[in-house]
């Protein structure tokens, strides 16, 4: 979908479909008023009859005849004006775009939000993100033969800025929104790729290709380089697979002055069978998504470069496949991580924390101001939070607060779980320093407690995205399959990084 920004009179714009938002409680929406006067007050009549109240995400399609150039108008409910925020703007716009696309719209136009002290810029960006994500689908393996899946109709969205209002900030916001949506799309494509099509080496190739295009310095370490670094935990997981592991390092350095360094670590288990502690068959196919943290990390680096963020962002992906094999690591085996800590492998299915252990150690070599890791680490986080929030744990209250704020802003919410020292007893090793599992109680926290041993004293935040990375309760901007979770969240965190402390 192409995005255009122009100055003009939205109701007069020659698109086949206009999209307009309607608040539940506030009538003072100049774009709506202009359209409604062109329509002879039809929307006001519907509202007065209570036939359309503007309830959030509610839809109404009007066919204005000769009143305006557009053949149809999709009205979307925006809910209460005071509740409007970027997350809701993304969702409402996605709802409307999906509706328009389903009706066969090809050229869609909408009015830019009226100037509101800079808010209009945030809302425009969110609207563009929602529009593009609404039309995402993964059809690489669909042949579109007889049993055609519906293809996307919409080719372009034009955001029409009212005459006299500034076009430039709206155009910049639309471009930023498009860049963020493209980064989410990249992450989703990587997630949705079957495990057999995206083993560690292929994931590495994709990451390096993205970096080459974006002008980001990148390299990929193989077996020997990792052995040299004594990454025994990561290599322990990899030894059961015929696929070689990769440690992918993407180093975005800003052109101008740098506001610090943030490292992002992603769990990149390209397929997780559980290893010798083999998973049951039910839904095992979902474990192609076990590299969702990696996918987000790669998307974030692309977004950082596209947005030219004024800080250094180092993305580190631990890419391995977890397989059962004659050479595979066995329950009871002891592995030694890069920082020298010894790990008893109680369960080979708790492999994510093993690969991240070495990735975190490696991240510290960059002397970052903060480390954020993202991982589909535990099924337990789905029991705790369902699909509406990622689990957050960390060692720095200010960092956690910033991540939370970014979550509210983007709608990619997080919820904090504690890392109290009492939980340490749960992962104490019998023959080694620490155990890679801690039984069923507090399964998600055990994962966090384990990783803490490798984050050192760098402010660190761990996001368990097992419940949010795929097949979440659908929203218009989040379809089935991979969600790209983490890209919008952490990109927002990074954008705010160099700025003043966030409120809320
Ligand atoms: N990748 C899984 C976590 C997972 C499971 C994510 C189901 C989404 C849905 C992870 O590697 C894993 O297997 N974790 C184990 C840990 C346990 C053995 C301590 C789990 O959650 O059961
Ligand atoms: Mn596992
Ligand atoms: Zn896993």
Image (cartoon, rainbow, N blue to C red):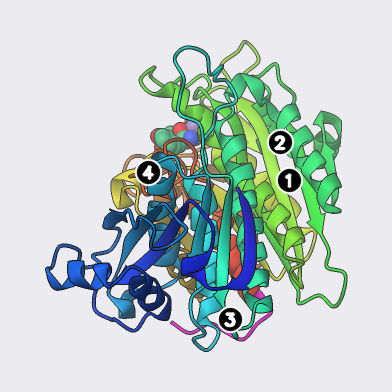
SS at circle 4:
loop
**Where, quadrant-wise, is the C terminus in this rendering?**
bottom left
Q: CA distance from mark 1 to mark 2?
A: 6 Å
Horizontal arrangement in the rendering, residue 325 relative to residue 214 (left or right): left
Q: CA distance from mark 4 to mark 3?
A: 41 Å
Residue 163: image tag: 3
Disc 1 crowd rating (10 Å Cα; few below 14, some 14-19, many 20+) is many
Q: Nearer the viewer, residue 2 or 260?
A: 2
Label 4 or label 3, whichever comes before in sequence order: 3
Q: Gap between marks 2 and 4, in whole Å? A: 34 Å
Overall secondary structure of the magenta stretch?
Answer: loop
Q: Which residue is mark 2?
A: 232
In the drawing, what numbered circle is on residue 472? 4
Q: Of marks 1 and 2, which one's residue comes earlier in the chain?
A: 2
State which mark lies toward you, 4 or 1: 4
- Going from N to C along the chain, the mark reached first, 2 or 4, is 2
Residue 343 visible within the image:
no
Residue 499: in magenta span: yes
Look at 32% across and 80% down and name the residue there. Answer: 82
Give yes or no for residue 46 being in the magenta stretch: no
Secondary structure found at label 2: helix
**Badges 1 and 2: C-beta atoms under 8 Å apart?**
yes
Give the structural element (helix, strand or loop) at label 1.
Answer: loop
**Residue 338 numbered mark, or none:** 1
Q: Residues within 10 Å of mark 2 (few under 14, many from 20)?
A: many
Q: Residue furthest front?
A: 66
The earlier-in-sequence mark between 3 and 1 is 3
Eye-nearest disc, 2 or 3: 3
Outermost residue to the bottom: 117
* Marks 4 and 1 close (CB-CB < 8 Å): no
| Segment colored magenta | 497-504
Residue closer to the observer: 79 or 237: 79
């Amino acid at each position: 979908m192409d995005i255009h920004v122009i100055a003009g009179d939205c109701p007069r714009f020659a698109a086949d479909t206009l999209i307009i938002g309607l608040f539940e409680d506030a009538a003072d929406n100049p774009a709506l008023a202009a359209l409604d006067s062109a329509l002879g007050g039809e929307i006001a009549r519907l509202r007065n009859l209570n036939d359309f109240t503007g309830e959030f995400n509610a839809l109404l399609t009007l066919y204005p005849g000769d009143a305006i150039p557009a053949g149809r108008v999709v009205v979307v409910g925006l809910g209460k004006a005071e509740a409007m925020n970027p997350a809701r703007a993304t969702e409402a716009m996605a709802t409307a775009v999906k509706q328009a696309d389903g009706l066969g719209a090809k050229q869609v136009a909408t009015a830019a939000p009226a100037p509101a002290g800079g808010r209009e810029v945030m809302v425009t960006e969110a609207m563009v993100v929602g529009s593009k994500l609404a039309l995402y689908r993964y059809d690489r393996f669909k042949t579109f033969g007889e049993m055609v899946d519906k293809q996307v109709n919409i080719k372009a969205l034009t955001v029409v800025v009212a005459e006299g209002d500034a076009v430039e900030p709206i155009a910049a916001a639309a471009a930023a929104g498009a860049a963020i949506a493209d980064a989410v799309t990249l992450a989703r494509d990587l997630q949705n790729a079957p495990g057999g099509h995206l083993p560690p080496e292929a994931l590495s190739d994709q990451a390096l290709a993205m970096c080459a295009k974006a002008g980001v310095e990148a390299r990929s370490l193989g077996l020997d380089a990792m052995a040299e670094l004594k990454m025994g935990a990561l290599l322990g997981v990899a030894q059961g697979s015929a696929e070689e592991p990769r440690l992918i390092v993407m180093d975005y350095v800003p052109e101008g002055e740098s506001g610090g360094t943030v490292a992002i670590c992603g769990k990149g288990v390209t397929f997780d069978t559980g290893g010798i502690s083999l998973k049951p068959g039910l839904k095992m196919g979902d474990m192609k998504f076990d590299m969702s943290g990696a996918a987000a990390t790669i998307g974030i680096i692309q977004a950082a470069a596209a947005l030219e963020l004024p800080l250094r962002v180092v993305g580190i992906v631990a890419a391995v496949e977890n397989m059962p094999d004659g050479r595979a690591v066995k329950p009871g085996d002891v592995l030694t991580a890069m920082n020298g800590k010894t790990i008893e492998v109680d369960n080979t299915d708790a492999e994510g924390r093993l690969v991240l252990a070495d990735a975190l150690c490696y991240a510290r070599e960059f002397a970052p101001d903060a480390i954020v890791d993202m991982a589909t680490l535990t099924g337990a986080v789905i029991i705790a939070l369902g699909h509406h929030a990622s689990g957050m744990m960390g060692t720095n209250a200010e960092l956690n607060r910033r991540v939370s704020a970014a979550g509210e802003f983007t709608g990619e919410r997080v919820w904090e779980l504690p890392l109290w020292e009492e939980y340490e007893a749960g992962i104490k090793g019998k023959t080694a320093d620490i155990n890679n599992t801690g039984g069923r109680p507090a399964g998600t926290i055990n994962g966090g407690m384990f990783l803490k041993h490798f984050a050192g004293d760098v402010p660190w935040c761990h996001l368990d995205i097992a419940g949010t990375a795929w097949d979440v309760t659908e929203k218009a901007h989040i379809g089935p399959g991979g969600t790209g979770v983490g890209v919008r969240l952490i990109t927002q965190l990074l954008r705010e990084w160099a700025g003043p402390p966030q409120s809320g």
